[in-house]
Amino acid sequence: MKASKISLYIFIVIGILALVCIFFPSDGIHLRFPGLADVMRGDTTQVTDETKLSPDELLDKRISDARLEEESQFIDYFKNNEARFFMPNDDVKYLDEFFAALDAAGETPVRVTHYGDSQIEIDRISCILRERLQEKFGGGGVGYIPLRKLGTYTYKVDVNPDLTIHYAFGGKQRNDDKYGMAASSAELSGGSVKIHAQTTPDTNYVHSHEFTRVTLMAGNNSAPITVTCGEQTKTIAPTATVGRVAFSIPSNKEVDITVSGAGSLYGALIDGAKGVSVDNIPMRGCSGTVFNKINADNLREHYTSMNVGLIIMQYGGNTMPYIKEGQPLDNYVASLGRQIAYLHQIAPKAKILFIGPSDMSTRIQGTMQSYPVLPKVVEGIKKVANENGAAFWDMYGVMGGHNSMIKWVQSGLAGSDHVHFTKKGAERVGDVLCKSMMLYYDYYKWRTSPVDKEKYMKSSAPADSTSAKNEISEQKM
């Protein structure tokens, strides 16, 4: 080799070594080679900060990592799933007080009052919510029953003789505001009326079948009203608001009540002595702007004495054929906001959940299509509900949005009127509503219950969140 090439080679090597010296760390490079034991067990994991932790610290870290993953599953549902609840101020803790009341229902009964339009008639949707809550938290009976002849999925009522009934939302109205909690009153003008109520033996609603407590509500009476249930007789003293008498009875599926005197009868409640009660109060033709027409003292008495923890309002469908964009729509949603504010004033401890209208179809240019204004009605109600401190559930979105009602009709989930659900469809809606509600309840329990370390000690690897992922499944129908 020529001397010039040798010299060039030496200078190149010296240059490379100089560069290494410049960039080489002052404290050197620390290498770890696997030992024989590591090779035999296949463990070539590099050193991490976990090796510096004690066993207890390592377990705590892995629990923390696992719970962050579990929580992310809840949060993803609450942010993205069509069946989520839109909470006021995005507060996922909004229903915590109601959930605490559910947990305590075995000692202190709690009540859910579900108002709505004809979409919840004959106990649609409410019956599923009632069954699921009573199955989990205890309770029995169907809650509120009106004092008129009626048959639903869950109960039948016979009244003899018929009573004159006034409604705040249409038909024959009172000349004052002395309605009961259902925005109605049945007038007893002397003499007696016999009421027979019985639950229906539908195996889908087994917890509604039997009840152990019967309550009659009456008022606006200048003389005592006498109420007889079986061998028991009680009186409701004269009152300008609402009085009530309650009877404890052996577990039963039917009851006879005789009421004598003069005054306004506001309905009856057939419940369990403890647990959860769910009232179904449909108002055919009502747009939901009726609550401030009900006497405040009458409403307050019911919500307070019956420990109503959740008020559900389900309206908007009756406005669809008539509402127009712009000022008419703005006026309607503003009126709903006033109703929510009124109920908050009357029942400050109760939470409010507003269920928006379902998809509905009308004939447009010869074909059935969703009402064009429907999405804006839904968005308007959601906005005003949240602004007035109520949660919102988007039934339109849960169904599938635009033109989903057509598919529901074709699947036997809705009737040929393209408005009302069939029994099967109502059960589907109620089931998804309950599952979504219970995910918020599960998150409440997840946050407020002590951490079960045993659950995370079964694996040396960070605990996975498979159970949470399975629970937080897709709820869109």
Image (tube, rainbow, N blue to C red):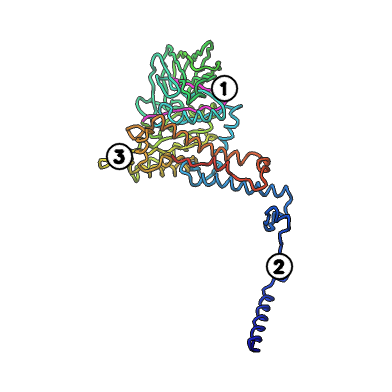
Under mark 2, the amino acid is: Ile
- Alpha-carbon neighbours of circle 3 within 10 Å: few (<14), some, or many (≥20)? some
Q: Nearer the viewer, residue 139 or 220?
A: 139
Q: CA distance from mark 2 to mark 3?
A: 74 Å
Q: Residue furthest left?
A: 366
Under mark 1, the amino acid is: Ala
| Residue 91: image location, x then y, percent | 54, 44
Residue 277 sits inside the magenta stretch? yes
Q: Quadrant of residue 331?
A: top left
Q: Which residues are magenta?
A: 264-284
Q: Can you identify the residue that label 3 sits on?
A: 368
Q: CA distance from mark 3 to mark 1?
A: 48 Å
Left of 373 or right of it: where is 390? right
Q: Residue furthest top?
A: 231
- Alpha-carbon neighbours of circle 2 within 10 Å: few (<14), some, or many (≥20)? few
The answer to whether the residues at label 3 and label 1 have Cβ atoms under 8 Å apart is no
Q: Residue furthest bottom?
A: 3
Say the numbered circle drawn on residue 273. Answer: 1
Q: Nearer the viewer, residue 89 or 62?
A: 62
Q: Nearer the viewer, residue 38 or 232?
A: 38
| Residue 445: image location, x then y, percent | 60, 38
Q: Can you identify the residue that label 2 sits on?
A: 29
- Alpha-carbon neighbours of circle 1 within 10 Å: few (<14), some, or many (≥20)? many
Question: Is residue 113 visible to us here?
Answer: yes
Secondary structure, mark 2, is: loop
Residue at image point 53% right, 41% down? 472
Location of the N terminus (image quadrant) = bottom right
Q: CA distance from mark 1 to mark 2?
A: 74 Å
Question: Is residue 266 visible to us here?
Answer: no
Question: Which comes before the other along the chain, label 2 or label 3?
Answer: 2
Compared to 13, does 254 lie above or below?
above
